[in-house]
Every structure is written in C-alpha cells, then in structure tokens.
Amino acid sequence: MQIESLINRLKQEDTKRLAFHELVKLYQEKLYWHVRKIVISHDDTDDVLQNTFIKVWKNIETFREESGLYTWLFRIATNEALTFLAQKKRRSIFSGSIENDYLIESLVSDDFFDGSEIQLKLQKAILKLPEKQRLVFNMKYFDEMKYEKMSEILKTSVGALKASYHHAVKKIEEQLKQE
Amino acid sequence: MKENLKNRIKQLPGNDNPFTTPEGYFDRFSERLMDKVNEESVADTKPKVSILRILRPALIMAASFAAIFFIILIPVHTIAPKLASNNNIKTEMIDLVAYYFINENEIIEALEYEETIEEYNDAALEEYLMASITEFDLVDYKN
C-alpha cells in the first residue's frame, strides 16, 4: 500500500519531487551495494547509482506496476552497471590490458575496501568469473536473494540461475585452492 | 548435487560485506542526486530551445520557397487551362470560316477531280508501258 501510494505520487507532477526523494532514501543502500559488487570501486558505483536514479526520474511514467518497483529498480541498476563495465572493457581492450584487469586494479587500489586477506582472495576469484556467473554469485551469496526474484531481475530461468551459481561456486573453490 | 554445493559454500570465506563507503555518504547522496536531477531537467529543456533557434532560418527559408512555389503554381494552374481552351475556340473558328467561303459545287468539283486523276493515271501508265516496251524487250525479260 505504501509503495502503491509512492508510485502514484511519483507519477504526479506536483508530488513527484518529494516522492522521488522518499524513493531514493528507501532504495539507495540496497542498490548501492548491488552495484558496488558489480563495478567494485566506490567512485564508479556512485556514478552508476546516480545514473540509475536519473533514469528512474525520467522514466517513472513508463513504469508498469505489474513488475514491482523493487524489481524494476534492480533491473535498471544492473543494466546501468553492466553498460558501465562494457564501456570500461572496451577502453581497456584498446589500451591492451586483459579483460577484468580493470576491476582487480580497482579492488586493490580502492580506499573503501576493508576486507581481510581471505576476503580479498575471494573477491579476486569472483572477478575472474564470467560476467553472468559473477552477477548470480553476488546476488545469491552476499545478498541472499531468492532465485525467483533474481529470475525477474535478470530475466533468466531459475534453472539456468541455479546452474550458473553451481558453476561459480565450483570455480571459486578451485581458484582459492590454487592460491 | 545440492549437498555437494552446500559443502562447497561452507569452504568459502564468510559473506560479510568487505566494502565500505565514505562517512555520511548515504546522508548526502539524495541531496547531490537532486542537484543533478535539476541540472538534467535544465539541460533537457535547453536543447529544445536551441534546436528551434538553429532550425529557424532553415524553416523560414523553406516557408519562403513554399510561398514562391504556390505563387507561381496557382496562376499556372488557373490561367493555363483558359489559354488551352482559347486555342480550341480558335481552331473551331478557322474551320467555320473555311466552310463559310467554300460552296457545295466547289466541293463536288474537287472530289471529281480526284477521281479523274486516278483514272488518268491508270490509262497513262498503260499507254506508257505500251509505248516504251517493245516485243524484243518482253522476249529478253522472259529469257
């Protein structure tokens, strides 16, 4: 009911600004941590998060309530984060570096990474995963998101998500044993 | 397979969040975002005005050409058919004048003259052939 009222106010010109402020306060942290695990650096996350909310501001009139606000916001944030990474990858390929090197560099040099040595190893192992597996692993392992919810956000079947998670866990385990 | 996955996950380090944010980041985020939204809103309205300004001379020129085109096209469409119909009247008048000055006898004479020329031509041709071709020529032609 609260969310319904928020959506209605977001779609009306005179209440849009205040309702948007409420929306940001409500979802900023959840979306931040979701994006942060994808793009790693705080500064990049900040850019992606701002772009996500600006997209929401511009497109709220087109939002169809059947998909759920939470799902819609996570989908926009995921797309923004992946688009951001794709642009970074393109640039790093041109500069001759290997794919995902940029993310590992970001992790090592990030002032806002406060993990132990084993957590750093885990993050490095996650960064070596293919993009989709990395996304699924983060959403399941860290955010403890249900497969059904994940399926709505990523528009992938539950079966495929389970398989991705299984492969990801296996690869990370092997990676950690090697080091 | 499920048990295997669970055991594997147990081997992994804990899922505590190792990342942090600058102090007070989430308190200020909304404010910074609203500033950006305002900038974007201004930017969204600005290009519309500038595009119109850029296109204005071209639009004026296009409108002028259209006006000139119609100024030329309308008289051509309205006056030209009249001229065409005037030409038809002229030819009809010439025909009427011609019929007025030629009487019936002259027309009959002209028709008879055409027939006599035709008869004369056949006879003249026969006479010409009889006069100019000899028996020797016919024998030569046969051989």
Image: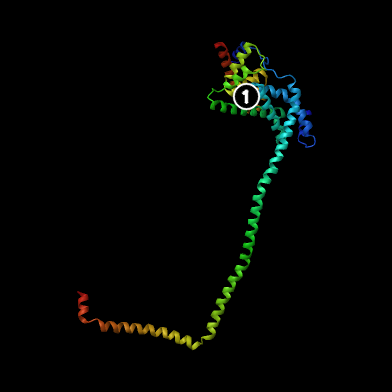
| Rendering coords of residue A46 (x, y %) | 68, 25
| Amino acid type indicated by mark 1 | Val
| Rendering coords of residue A109 (x, y %) | 62, 18
| Rendering coords of residue A161 (x, y %) | 61, 23
Report the quarter where the N terminus of chain A lies. top right
Between B100 and B7, the one lying in front of the other is: B100
Left or right, A33 with respect to B135, comes to: right
Kindly identify which residue carries mark 1: A158
Left or right, A160 with respect to A62, comes to: left
Element under label 1?
helix
In percent of the image, x 59 and y 29: which residue is there?
Answer: A87
In percent of the image, x 74 and y 22: which residue is there?
Answer: B26
Between A26 and B56, the one lying in front of the other is: B56
Report the quarter where the C terminus of chain A lies. top right
- Report in which chain the residue with disc 1 lies: A
In percent of the image, x 56 and y 14: which residue is there?
Answer: A175
For residue A173, above or below residue A29: above
For residue B63, above or below residue B123: above
The quadrant where residue A44 appears = top right
In percent of the image, x 65 and y 19: which residue is there?
Answer: A140
Would you say residue A156 is visible in this rendering?
Answer: no
| Rendering coords of residue B97 (x, y %) | 55, 82
